[in-house]
Image: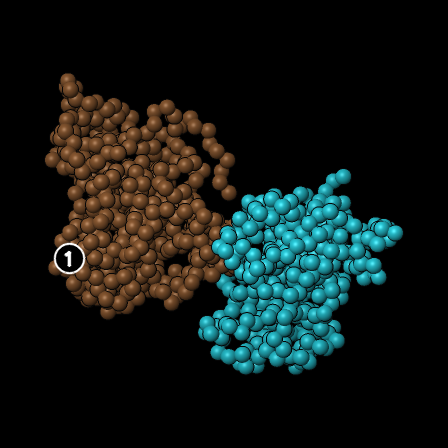
Amino acid sequence: MTQITKPHTGKILIKRGRVIDPRQNIDRIADVLIENGRIKAIGDIPAQSGVEEISAAGKVVAPGLVDVHVHLREPGGEAKETIATGTRAAAAGGITSVISMPNTNPPMDNVTDIQFVLGRAAQDASARVYPTGTISKGREGNEMSEIGAMVRVGCVAITDDGSGVQSSQLLRRALEYTKTFDIPVMEHAEDASLFGGGVMNEGVVATRLGLKGIPRQAEYIMAARDIALAELTGGRLHLTHMSTRESVAVIRHAKERGLNVTADVTPHHLVLTEDAVAEYMANAKVNPPLRTAEDVAALRQALKDGIFDCIATDHAPHTQSEKAQEFSEAPFGLIGLETSLPLMVTELVRGGVLTLSEMIHRMSDVPAKIFKLPGGSLEVGANADVVIFDPEAKQTFTRFVSRSQNSPFLGWQLYGVVERTIVGGHTVYQRASDASPADKPSPVPHR
Amino acid sequence: MKANNDHVSHLLGLEYLSKLQIEQIIDQARPMKQLFTRTVKKVPLLRGRSVALVFFEPSTRTRTSFELAAKRLSADTLSVAASTSSVQKGESLIDTAKTLEAMKTDFIVLRHAASGAPHLIAREVKCHVVNAGDGQHEHPTQGLLDVFTILEKKKRIDGLKVAILGDVAHSRVARSNLWALSKLGAHVTVCGPETLLPKGLPEIFGPNVTVTSRIDEAVKDADVINVLRIQLERQKENLMPSVREYAEIFGLNSQRLATAKRDCIVLHPGPMNRGVEITSEVADSHQSVILEQVTNGIAVRMSVLYWLTGSPVMTEQKAKALPSESEQLL
């Protein structure tokens, strides 16, 4: 196992790739030289003896992707995923930094829990792991966690993700208190009473299937409330996994007024509609639920317009047997680390919504900035966190590196094949060379 | 010989059947009804086959109806109830179904509180899966027996005005009725408190389905009124203020029934809350066909089981010629 925390020594020269680094406004064919785990130079760099050379002709060379919403499940959910397996999946998806969610068992609401994640990550992670802590002790929505102490040991944001903060007063206090530490409060915007035990988007499909619906208002009522509290406090609010066109409208309004609000959207909400849930496909059961085609169109436009600052997966692994239960019993969530880049290349770049450079801006540069993480750029002196991918090659997803397989994209053929992922100079993922992904036979589509 | 059902292997819902397939099952229920209304009620059409009745929700009429239907076709039946099965030990639904499949069960008749439960096992097992009511989704044999009962009385479905009254949002009976009736050309008015009317019914079922919360509109000039059972728990969820108010504003009573067509018939899937969604006066009136529904349920379920095997269509003529089980033994 690669220990990415060990310093990498030596030189690596990535030759003739299309280097895309939005932060430096670079998009051209160039060579990238890595030395001792850091970016040394970008340009026309002659081959040198003793330098490992990687040919990237025809490929894109970009800063490693940064995913700000990932459930690594450790501790307590090791049957679903661990810090080791989850970051291996991240590496396979070209993701070099993940922000891990604190709704583990027990929830991460104290210094020891944050240190546990960092310690495990130092041992056997294949990507950089930045932990978050809960807003409230026990993630119970009542008393504030020891936020300051957690920040001191490496917590990069706080969130009660998995459920929304119901108490307006608690969220107000959290937004106020965190100003000292300058970290975002990440909100899963959801009104619990309107959510009311729903299992999919409220609407025609839910009526037809006889499933309890979750109205879109459960999300955007809280998004609007959260923004009002950001205005009241001046705290940093980050709204995560937004799913409705009305949420887009309230975020757009907040940004026009210059409020301190950022937001992310997931690949699955940008690609799938509630139809993916029929007939009772639990792998598409996710919270917030998949919405309608109008929502997908509005979310895509919002991403293009910068109303959404970044793309985050909400990677939420669950075991096969959990997802093989009755639809109403199966847990919410789907895995996303390995399909994120391919979905965005296929649906958004090839679909004409974003350029490759804009995509990398939203998947690497901006998320790193919002959460003040290193990475997100290939600036000289930066950590050598790099993804090399082929935007023209295709692959069919039949098996995932993640410990869990709960993806609605099983059987999908997607453009955008990750060739190699590098973290601090260490190669943490390299595509197996024996199978040419474009030539693989496509399996029977998953029903 | 060509199978009569285009190789439909499961009955998961009436949504998935064509108009023609619904008509085949209904037509075949007629000879089935003849078969079991004679003195010796058993025929050997499914002899040697086994039917597992897997009921994860309390049920008297549907379970016994399926059991009698299977037995009258000479199939072996076995009952699995959640309370006495391995489900109590945490066994998953799929594992339960696979276990029954491994015992070479031919049919799994499933009643389950979760919508889509039969779909889940139909993807995993080879035996015929029959939905005997899944959550708030469908109750296809109830829909079929309701249509069969209406046809017996009215001789047609096309053009009839049918009112469905009650908790439509949570009703699998309503959905199955809506699929069958809309496919067969009835004009259906769905009526209940706004809190119990789901979104999008006309989009799903087409322009022949209208929705109102005014019972007088729904009942006026109706040929058929199908009254749904109201779950008394709905009161706790703030879906209605009280049972008393429900009865007063949304219940079917004689005064309201009098505004329907003179020969309007009244159906109820049972069990009834007398004095809530329906008054005893209406339930016991000559316009009520509630007990006939129960009888017809067996015929329709016999037809469904037989139809799913892909056997040649049973006609009244063939049925007359069929020996009953005991005659054969003699």
Q: Residue furthest top?
A: A49
Q: Colour of chain A?
A: brown
Q: Residue at x 55, y 61 (%)?
A: B83
Q: Residue at x 29, y 26 (%)?
A: A58
Residue A19 falls in which quadrant of the image? top left
Q: Chain of mark 1?
A: A
Q: Colour of chain B?
A: cyan
Q: Is residue B292 left or right of residue A340?
A: right
Tell me the residue that label 1 is attached to. A149
| Percent x, y of residue B158 | 70, 60
Give percent across and percent down for residue A76: 32, 51
- Is residue A96 visible in the rendered image? The answer is yes
Q: Disc 1 on helix, strand or loop?
A: helix
Q: Is residue B214 above or below residue B57?
A: below
Q: Classify residue A400 by image quadrant.
A: top left
Image quadrant in which the N terminus of chain B is located: top right
Amino acid type, residue under disc 1 in the picture? Ala
